[in-house]
Each structure stands twice: as structure tokens, then as C-alpha cells.
Image (cartoon, grey):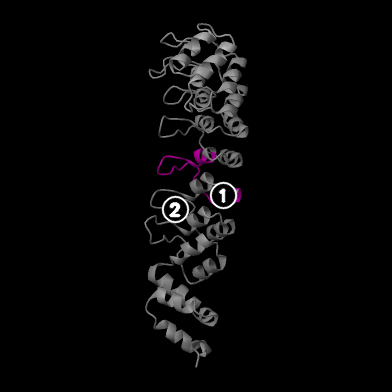
Amino acid sequence: MPLDSFPPEIISIIGNHIASINDLFNFLRSNRRLYNVLINSLYRRNTKSDGGSALVWYASQGNETGIRSMLAAGGNINIREPKQAQSTALMEAVRHNHTAIVKVLLENGALPDAADLHSRRPLTLSTSARSDVAITKLLLEYGANINLVAFDKRAPLVEAIRSNQDVKVGLLLDHGADIHITSSRDAMSPLHIAAARNAKPAIIKVLVDAGIYVDAPDGRGRTPLQVAAMHSSTRAVRWLLDCGATANFENTSPDSQGWTALFYAVKSKNSRIDNKTIIKTLLLHGAKIDTTNFAKETPLLHAVSQGATKQAQILLEYGANGLSKEELK
């Protein structure tokens, strides 16, 4: 007599005598009728053994039926997976972009700020990845702390800027994100980070409109415009200037020797880019072509000393004094 033809009561008794949860899981997967008879028993046993860790797996798979069944069996909605990261069901739902699951979990009491072993939180995950903006909205609606930082000191606002998501940046600012938060490295403001990442114009504008001073220096004395020039962020340079950035602001910190944005542009961090458009844009916005740093170098002399021949040629084309094109060859 085939096993699946036994009465449900007999199948349940057999299931109850299977000691291992994994063995029970494999047993019920062998046949649809066995599954239907024993699945609720599996939910109860998982809940009894460790509080319901299967919730985390169901969340990662986007399985709403499994989640609701585990909750009905008494599963702890804030249970952590027994793995090293100790992620929660909510974290996994956010990580895998399951909006409906995020909603179910929050409605049933999931803690919006419960972090994993590395101090990563759901809101930071939702703003650092290309997840549905509705997930970020749900987390904020259910009380996620907008200014908590992750283990690497990145706040949700910083993550949204780094991933160039203007809608999420605006949403976070509307909910009270701290515009004065700085990175742990170099004390860069959100506007500096936007400049370095060549962020969308909408991000730069909303940060300035929110009250970040466009010429505020970071921990190394650099303005957002100087950081943008340094990172060859052409779009950011243009928009920062349109927002009132000072083209001739001097970085007077000991490491920078009185550099203006033009010095950063002629020898950018990305040496493969000649920054022709950035140099032109700075000059058209009033950058002094023959300004000198503390070492009495002009941007042209500095470009030559660094082997930035293309940048030097551009400066000569725009009237820089000091060398001829022939001297560059």
C-alpha cells in the first residue's frame, strides 16, 4: 500500500516519529499529499526548535504564504538566522526587494531598526541598493530611525546619494535626515559625497536647498566644487557652480597649499581624463587662470610639473601665461 494513500492521521504519526526537521522537510517534499498533510507540523516544529528561523528563508524567497503560516504557528517575527550574519526576515525581504513581504512583516511587528551582526539595518539596505522606493517609504512609515549609521558610518542619506537615487534622497530629507552628518573618512558632507559621485543635478540641488553651504570645506579643507573637479565629476562641477559655488575658493589647509578648483582639475584623481570640459566650465564661471598657490605655481605650471600636458595645453588655449606650447613638447 503506497504511503501517500494512508489516512492523514497515520501520516501525521509517521511524521511525528521523524526526529530531524531536515529529514521531515525532505520527507514531505517527496509527495504533494505528504506535503499538504505535514507542512503545518513542520512549521510548528521549526517554531518550537528555534523560534521559527524558516521565516528568514521565506522572506528571502518572497514567500508570503510561508511567512503567514510560520506566524500562525507562533514564529518569532524578529528571529535571526542561525548563520554568521544573523540577518532578520525583514532584512532579507529588503535585501531581495520583496516589497509585499516587507509590508507583511512590518504589519505583524517586525522591528524596523533591528540590525544584523554587522550593524546593517533595513533602511540602510533599502537606500544603498536599487530597491523599490516603496520599501524605503514603508520603513519610514513604521518608524525606522533615519539617522542611524551602519558599521562603516554610512547613514541612509549617504547611501542614497552614493547610489545616485534622487527620489530616495528627497524622501529622506522630507523625513528629517540630518544634512550635517559627515563621513568617517575626511569628514565629507553629503554634498561632498554627491560631488565625488557625480550625482544627478536633482540631488545636488535638493541638498543645497536643504541648507548645506555650497562652499563648506571637508576635513581636508576642500569644497564640494574642488572635490568634484578632483574626481572629474563634470556634471557636478556645472551644477555646483550654478548653485553658487565659488570658483576661486582657496583651500588653505597644509596639504593643499592654497589650491583652487582649477588646480584640482588640471591634475585630477583620474589621470586618464583631461578634464577639458571642467577646466572650460571653471574659466567661464570666473576661475582665475593665473592664480598662484602657496608655492607660487600657477595652474599651468602645476600641470606641467605633474606631466598633465593636455590640461596645460587647454590652459594655454584660454590665455594662461608662463609657457608656450612649444615648451610643452
* Residue stretch rendered in magenta on the structure: 133-160
Residue receiving disc 1: 131
> Could you tell me which residue is drawn at 50 percent across and 19 percent down?
266
Label disc, if present, on residue 114 of the rendered structure: 2
Image height of 193 relative to 31, above or below: above
Front residue of 255/50: it is 255
> Could you tell me which residue is drawn at 55 percent across and 15 percent down?
313
Callout 1: helix, strand or loop? Answer: loop
> Is residue 290 visible in this depiction of the protein?
no
The amino acid pointed to by label 1 is Ser
Q: Horizontal and vertical percent for residue 308?
A: 48, 19
Q: Horizontal and vertical percent for residue 166?
A: 60, 39
> Could you tell me which residue is drawn at 45 percent across and 10 percent down?
297
Front residue of 201/275: it is 275
Marks 2 and 1, how far apart at CA = 19 Å
The amino acid pointed to by label 2 is Ala
Q: Using residue 224 as the reference point, say whether residue 134 is left or right of it.
A: right
Answer few, some or many: residues within 10 Å of disc 1's Cα (few below 14, many 20 plus, some between 14 and 19).
Answer: some
Corner quadrant of residue 175: top right
